[in-house]
Image (tube, coloured by chain):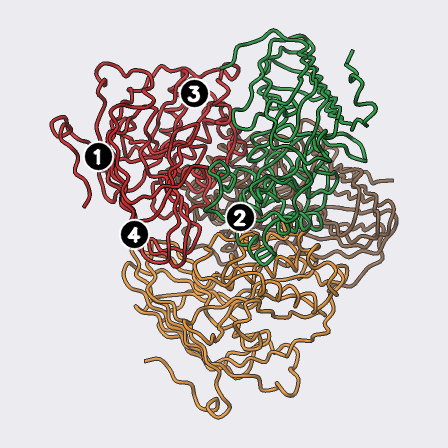
Chain colours: A orange, B green, C red, D brown
Amino acid sequence: MTSRRAAGITRCMKPRPKAAAAPAPAAEAEGRIFDVDCKLSYTLLDDTHFLFIVHALDGMDQQVVTESLRITPTLEHELHTDPVFGHRTLRLNAPTGPLTLRYRARVRVMRKAPDLKAAEVPISALPPEVLADLMPTRYCESDRLASAAWKMFGDTPPGHARVQAISDWIHDHVEYRVGSTDSSTTASDVFLQRAGVCRDFAHLGVTFCRALNIPARLAVGYSRFDAPPPDFHAMFEAFLGGEWHLFDPTQLTEPLDLVRIAVGRDAADVAFATLFGPVRTRLIRPEVERVRARRARKTPARGA
Amino acid sequence: MTSRRAAGITRCMKPRPKAAAAPAPAAEAEGRIFDVDCKLSYTLLDDTHFLFIVHALDGMDQQVVTESLRITPTLEHELHTDPVFGHRTLRLNAPTGPLTLRYRARVRVMRKAPDLKAAEVPISALPPEVLADLMPTRYCESDRLASAAWKMFGDTPPGHARVQAISDWIHDHVEYRVGSTDSSTTASDVFLQRAGVCRDFAHLGVTFCRALNIPARLAVGYSRFDAPPPDFHAMFEAFLGGEWHLFDPTQLTEPLDLVRIAVGRDAADVAFATLFGPVRTRLIRPEVERVRARRARKTPARGA
Amino acid sequence: MTSRRAAGITRCMKPRPKAAAAPAPAAEAEGRIFDVDCKLSYTLLDDTHFLFIVHALDGMDQQVVTESLRITPTLEHELHTDPVFGHRTLRLNAPTGPLTLRYRARVRVMRKAPDLKAAEVPISALPPEVLADLMPTRYCESDRLASAAWKMFGDTPPGHARVQAISDWIHDHVEYRVGSTDSSTTASDVFLQRAGVCRDFAHLGVTFCRALNIPARLAVGYSRFDAPPPDFHAMFEAFLGGEWHLFDPTQLTEPLDLVRIAVGRDAADVAFATLFGPVRTRLIRPEVERVRARRARKTPARGA
Amino acid sequence: MTSRRAAGITRCMKPRPKAAAAPAPAAEAEGRIFDVDCKLSYTLLDDTHFLFIVHALDGMDQQVVTESLRITPTLEHELHTDPVFGHRTLRLNAPTGPLTLRYRARVRVMRKAPDLKAAEVPISALPPEVLADLMPTRYCESDRLASAAWKMFGDTPPGHARVQAISDWIHDHVEYRVGSTDSSTTASDVFLQRAGVCRDFAHLGVTFCRALNIPARLAVGYSRFDAPPPDFHAMFEAFLGGEWHLFDPTQLTEPLDLVRIAVGRDAADVAFATLFGPVRTRLIRPEVERVRARRARKTPARGA
């Protein structure tokens, strides 16, 4: 267990990415810069333990340049880094009353354009660490949807095209409707009711891929939507050609612009907030903006 | 409650149909003749109450010419006729030990060829007695599959063509696989797992129709299969153009040749046997043969 | 199909019950008098077909003394009486715009106090018309909950005491929580999540009874709650000692005071409103008051 | 990805445990010795990729003394060790035809008797690596069963006694019935149908614990049953007092005698065999015997 640290604002300058991943193609060498400004606000009706997964991922195909965290009231907290994926979980005990959390970060995203020719990896050649991403999970019952997946996509050319076909099918056949699902909705529910929100779309994509023996997982993060309101976003990733490829079946955003927070087997692993107590949510406002070249050189604004 | 009758063999000659239905077109005036020979055999581990629905329907679009029932050992039984649909339920208490039931009948089926131009009836014009056939039932959760049904068949031309499209889709996308389902399998299970047997195919057809506001119900009876073994068969009926139209999404049989036993909202209403006790099934052999014109004039053979 | 009638207000004085049922015990000879005042209000976004089941049942253990129906705007409508149970379904087509329905009635309820010694009827002695009430339905999957039912209530003394034990268990273990369920929630969902509203409580009661071979059905009607707001109520009925007995597992009301609207196999049969079109609900206010002896002699007030 | 090794028989003498865990109490210092002899036999109808998780766990509270693996025909294979839990996954491609796998091991189990006074760890004090064991998974929908869990066990004294109460409740209310479940059966299915086999019992235990904020996971391994046939066994583990405690709700075996193969979030993680191809299973015979002191000094027999 990590040691506890006195907190308030955690701010650190990071000169270079911890896990620099494979070098990006020249054109993307410097990546794209995004400013994240996430504000969460609650009223606690009793002392409550919180798990927050809101920090931008510092690793994989992106790098946190600067970040700050402000918790009001000032509270002790811990920050755990997942040993496998590198995402960070913030834990804290908060007393009855108001709780506000503001996380700000400047993040460099160095994601490559997808390789549209990426092939499916034969099962026997899959690296052992992705085998778990073939298995069914709470929200992705790939066993239950296996026959449907094979009948629907079994004859599609394998590889990136097949996963794109899955993503397109979801976009074309599932309606994006706020309020149509809740935290117990699974991929087979979504397949039946043909409606959901971003996490439901992503769960269905994960499920079809796994059913077809393509490792797949959920990716959550900050994305800019043309239409308000700002919200956390979820996509899915499929393992093709030895690498993870992002797909957004909602087609509301551009995968290249996702500022990753975490990846997980499904939403049970990477909820942005898990609350152990009676709480009223007052505000969820995770904003993100791309920083144009000129502006990126300046220091990002910080919260008051 | 009907009076109890001493039984053994019940045999009766029926000179004409009780409910003669609308007159069939000239070409079908005499109908098609079928001989049914249904043998069921059980070993009862305790005294058991049985409900059997195996008698050929004497009404709607068919007429029972002769029939016989032999129960071994000889037992008192009752025969109830459903006040709405006319199907008959045989009830009996049988003691521990073997029980054999043999039902034989010659049946004239006077079903018209389907009207391929039959239109959907607007909801406001549906007769009140078919409104219940719009509602979801145990095995036909038309509420859960409503969005999928509209997305899949909402743009198909309405009427007979739409129900045919539903039936064809089921045939093309659901695998007929014995043992893939059980008595708790619902239409949404079948839609997810894409496998089932005749009753599952029919339930899915019923479900899609109801979701699209087309009254639909299950029809069970005797059908001849090219490949053994003989078994009870299930189809679905849709209410089009003011009449019920049979569809067989398994495409294993010809709806014109179904010898009806019963219709119901789903299989919960019309199981061929419902057993209230511990029983081992030894034999289910419901055979049916079409009788050609020459032979039909002769008296049908009777069981020993 | 019934003929259409011009409508607006339908008002009729009924000197005596159509189906007087068994005579009530002396103390209840005159029954209890209730005044119902039900107001429903909608905004239709398109022309819409409606089925309303809101008329008080005129039969079984109650008698409609007077009733009136006002539909605004004035619209043609039909009123169908269910051939089996006698409940009435109001059908109408309404144009885009506002729709208001007001149903008022004075009803004499002549329900007997329950026979606490009523025995379960052996399956072999059940009248044929209640056999369907043993079968699973959309919201009452008695097949899925059969083992649980037998393990929970198999050793309880059979008869009224067993059904009371079921009703009490539901009251003690399921939380009454508005908003915890929706129109697709089934008895097994309720059993898992341990929360629901009156129809969910009733569905679970129906389900346990059927699993234990006790015929059971849903009863809906007008009940007075001590705490607002007024709402339609649902209970369940079990067939004991040759008669139907009402149970209210919510314990919010007194079954003797239910003004019945309808009985059905589950909520799919007896929804108070079924709408075939896009509609916004503005008001659901089904009020009921018991009329004390003195006041009952006066003519009930009528709506403006 | 690990390198491939030519195989056939893998045999290694292990002088001491890799991960010796906390020292066992004196009385258990030498542990209990078990001989495992697991034979699996298949007929492959096509070339098939296999994942086997059958190796005894060498770590936690046990130590592999010797082990051997024989694959017939001789095939290349890989053995991956899970970086978190230490269980081993055997991967191989096998050609059409017969495939037999025989794994034998002598294992020292140094499990302590459970601490009946172990307390529940407050959520805020849970080590980060067990937080995932609070989350719902494919077969353990702790979110769906949360209300039931709290209503059933919320008032039980917390700690070991509460988990024991859960285990006892499962034993008393769920019937052990071979064939009652399949690979898609979840904890809520088991809770409804009140029947299952060892993995179903364990999943339900895991689910109730997680719902009550007690981290829990599945443990699979070799156990001796008094009644044949031998089979892989599953139990559940709950995190109490800072340590994992084994519970066997089937009460068919003694947790102290489980020879662990693996732990996982649920059965999706730790199936003993995962097959990617058409295969007929011919034999599953995982045997285990406790070796008494005298015999334990001798070298275990090896397969022909």
Of mark 4 and mark 3, the one earlier in the sequence is 4
Q: Give the residue pinned by disc 3.
A: C156
Which class describes the residues within 10 Å of circle 2: few (<14), some (14-19), or many (20+)? many
Chain letter of the residue beneath label 3 in the structure image = C
Q: Give the residue pinned by disc 4.
A: C73
Residue B211 marker: 2
- Discs 4 and 3 carry the same chain letter: yes
Give the distance between the C-alpha atoms of the residues marked 1 and 3, in whole angstroms. Answer: 39 Å
> In the picture shown, does residue B62 fall above or below B92?
below
Which class describes the residues within 10 Å of circle 3: few (<14), some (14-19), or many (20+)? some
Give the distance between the C-alpha atoms of the residues marked 1 and 2, in whole angstroms. Answer: 37 Å
Which class describes the residues within 10 Å of circle 1: few (<14), some (14-19), or many (20+)? many
Chain letter of the residue beneath label 4 in the structure image = C
For the residue marked with disc 3, what is the amino acid?
Thr
For the residue marked with disc 1, what is the amino acid?
Asp
Q: Give the residue pinned by disc 1.
A: C35
For the residue marked with disc 2, what is the amino acid?
Ala
Residue D210 in view, yes or no: yes
Give the distance between the C-alpha atoms of the residues marked 4 and 3, in whole angstroms. Answer: 54 Å
- Discs 1 and 2 carry the same chain letter: no
Q: Quadrant of the C terminus of chain D?
A: top right
Mark 1 and mark 3 in contact? Answer it, CB < 8 Å: no
